[in-house]
Image: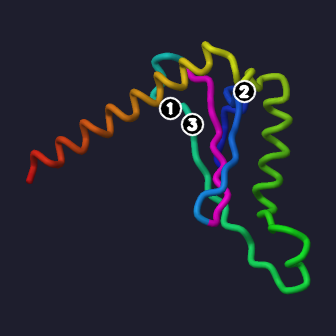
């Protein structure tokens, strides 16, 4: 998957998005780092045959391996989801991303 700084992996989330599993990995980066705070991967569900249809949804084997490794990496790093400081950091990061996107859209509109 191309992740080289395994010690910077802090947590991950897994969501279903339009028929694909979406794995998002979060990193603890230095303040001045130009590397992203998170990386997103999409895994399409493998096609199932009629005999496996009753076994539940199929999951990509690469995704299963990634989750297993991420569980080992983040075993003691998973933050309390109700930690106020963590939530504030996520909110501030999200706000920064939204502001940058709005500025990009405004710049595109001015070019018309």
| Residue 7 tag number | 2
- Percent coordinates x, y for residue 48 in the rendering: 80, 79
Q: Identify the image quadrant of residue 112.
A: bottom left
Asked whether, in this view, residue 1 is left or right of residue 68, the answer is left
Q: Relative to the observer, which residue lies in front, 74 or 82?
A: 82
Disc 1 target residue: 35
Q: Compared to 54, does 50 lie above or below?
A: below
Instruction: Write the residue at 82% across / 52% down.
Output: 65
Q: Compared to 21, does 101 lie above or below?
A: above
C-alpha distance separating marks 1 and 3: 9 Å
Task: Report the span colored magenta.
Answer: 19-29
Q: Identify the image quadrant of residue 97.
A: top left
Q: Is residue 26 magenta?
A: yes
User: What crowding class fits label 3: few (fewer than 14 Cα within 10 Å), some (14-19), or many (20 or more)?
Assistant: some
Q: Is residue 9 magenta?
A: no
User: What crowding class fits label 2: few (fewer than 14 Cα within 10 Å), some (14-19), or many (20 or more)?
Assistant: few
Q: Relative to the observer, which residue lies in front, 35 or 49?
A: 49
Label the magenta part by its dominant secondary structure: strand
- Percent coordinates x, y for residue 15 in the rendering: 67, 50
Q: SS at mark 2?
A: helix
Q: Compared to 91, does 16 lie above or below?
A: below
Q: Of tags 1 and 3, which is closer to the observer? A: 3
Contact flag, marks 1 and 3 (Cβ < 8 Å) = no
In the rendered structure, which disc, 3 or 2, sits on the residue that comes first in sequence? 2
Disc 3 target residue: 38
C-alpha distance separating marks 1 and 2: 14 Å
Q: Identify the image quadrant of residue 96.
A: top left
User: What crowding class fits label 1: few (fewer than 14 Cα within 10 Å), some (14-19), or many (20 or more)?
Assistant: few
Asked whether, in this view, residue 40 is left or right of residue 76, the answer is left
Q: SS at mark 1?
A: loop
Instruction: Write the residue at 83% across / 23% down.
Output: 76
């Amino acid at each position: 998957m191309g992740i080289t700084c395994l010690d910077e992996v802090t947590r991950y989330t897994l969501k279903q998005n339009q028929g694909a599993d979406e794995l998002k990995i979060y990193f603890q980066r230095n303040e001045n780092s130009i590397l992203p705070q998170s990386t997103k991967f999409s895994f399409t569900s493998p096609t199932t045959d009629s005999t496996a249809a009753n076994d539940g949804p199929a999951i990509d084997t690469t995704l299963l391996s990634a989750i297993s490794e991420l569980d080992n990496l983040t075993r003691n790093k998973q933050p309390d989801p109700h930690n106020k400081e963590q939530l504030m950091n996520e909110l501030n990061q999200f706000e920064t991303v939204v502001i940058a996107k709005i500025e990009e859209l405004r710049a595109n509109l001015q070019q018309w």
